[in-house]
Amino acid sequence: MSVLWDAPITVTTAVQFFETLAANRPARLRKLHELPGSAVFIDEAHAAIPIWLWPQSWLWVKELTSEWSCHFVLASGSLAKFWENPDIVSAPECIPNLLPADIRGLLAEEEERRVEVRTESGRMNCEELTQFVAEKDGPTLVILNTVQSAAVLADAMRKKGYDVVHLSTALAPADRERVIDRVRGRLVDPSDNEWFLVATSCVEAGVDFSFRTGVRESCSVASVIQTGGRVNRHGEWTCSELWDVRLVDDSMFKRHPAFEAPRKVLAEMLAEGEFGADATTTVTEALRRELVRRDVRAKADELLKLESLEEFPKVAELYDVIGADTRTVVVDPALVERLNEGGRVPWRELLRGSVQLWAKRVEQLKIQRVNGHEELYYWTGAYDSEFLGYMAGVLPLIQGKETGLYA
């Protein structure tokens, strides 16, 4: 990874790339000098940036191709053709597909045989979901919408004696890497079937997992398709099942409010039989329906107006890819000690030993700042590097409040 993008091949994040295009300060913009004539490959483009940022971002991409001699490839297993939607771009366009039509047809036929998407309409509590998951052919992947829900289910299933692996951002990156290696090792053993991976969307893309069965908390059409890429990925089984499920609203299973509109669209399309083998057509239709339910134009138009008026500081301020009010919390005790003693810690090492927590949760848990580092906090509760991560310290608090042991 090159910080200044001056290597022959530079690997960076969508956040870094697009926020650099929106930046207004020399420290960020100096990287752009390396961009003319480049080929830019945007992987998992469906989730690269929020949809309301695409109207302005698309104009920048077009300018880079026409004025800077750049070439762009948009890649995803669930890529919506947003550039054809007049609600997103002012002048819909047609861009070429790298795969010939005959190959796309063969792949669609194979996709229909690889995995079957099914739905369970009733809402389930933790005990009911545990029973539902346990009845499936394994190994089984379970993806829930929040860190808390995944930890609650993983903890409950392990206490009932099931062989469970847990993977979410409750674990620091260094610990997640070890869990991923462990999961990959188990998946290559055809006799190791009676176990479960309970995770969040952090495993939806970018990991080469292939499970016999998948269970996905209802989220969006794109998420179902992405999860399907972790089920029977290499065609080991004749056909596998991917279940769309819904959970009860209680204090244990944490509901994700951002998924309300996509969840309704998913339910509609499953009921109507609109979930076809052509992922691009399916997710493009889902996007069209979601836009009807969300006011994306107001923010998009504001950004376009600011850019046209050359209000570049305001553009940089408004252009927020992640849009999450989180804090960096160091969970590695050795790193905390070095920081408190005034030692220097390389940023990559710091991130590998830290997690991101919502600012509200940091305040609720009264997490303390690292000495001399106002932007950093350190974790003092229980931390399980092999299983629940920082949720090992949070779950007892949630369970205590649920049982009335304390207010």
Image (cartoon, rainbow, N blue to C red):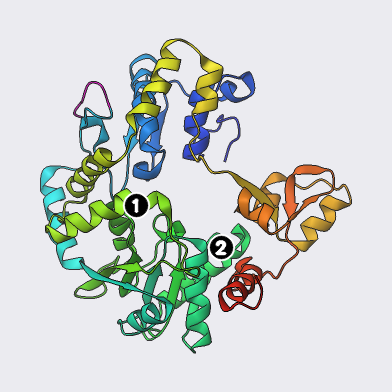
Foreground disc of the pair 2, 1:
1
Closest to the observer: 377 or 173?
377
Taking the image as drawn, is residue 8 in sight? no
Where is residue 62? Give x, y as percent.
33, 21
The residue to which callout 1 is attached is 260
Q: Going 17% across and 46% down the picture, which residue do you hit?
A: 281
Looking at the image, which residue is at 30% across and 82% down? 137
Residue 289 within the magenta-colored segment of the rendering: no
Horizontal side of 388 relative to 332 (left or right) equals: left
What residue is disc 2 on? 177
State the residue lying farthest toward the top: 309
Query: Which quarter of the rendering shows the C terminus?
Result: bottom right
Which amino acid type is shown beneath numbered disc 2?
Answer: Glu
x and y, in percent, of residue 98 in the image:
23, 39
Q: Is the residue marked by circle 2 packed among few (<14), some (14-19), or many (20+) residues within 10 Å? A: some
- Identify which amino acid the numbered label 1 is placed on: Glu
Considering only order in the chain, which callout, 1 or 2, is on the residue closer to the N terminus? 2
Give me the residue at 69% from left, 59% from top: 365
Q: What span is in magenta?
A: 89-94
Is residue 260 left or right of 360 when viewed as pictured? left
- In the figure, residue 95 lies in which quadrant? top left
Please name whichever residue, 354 or 191, is drawn nearer the observer in this view of the structure: 354
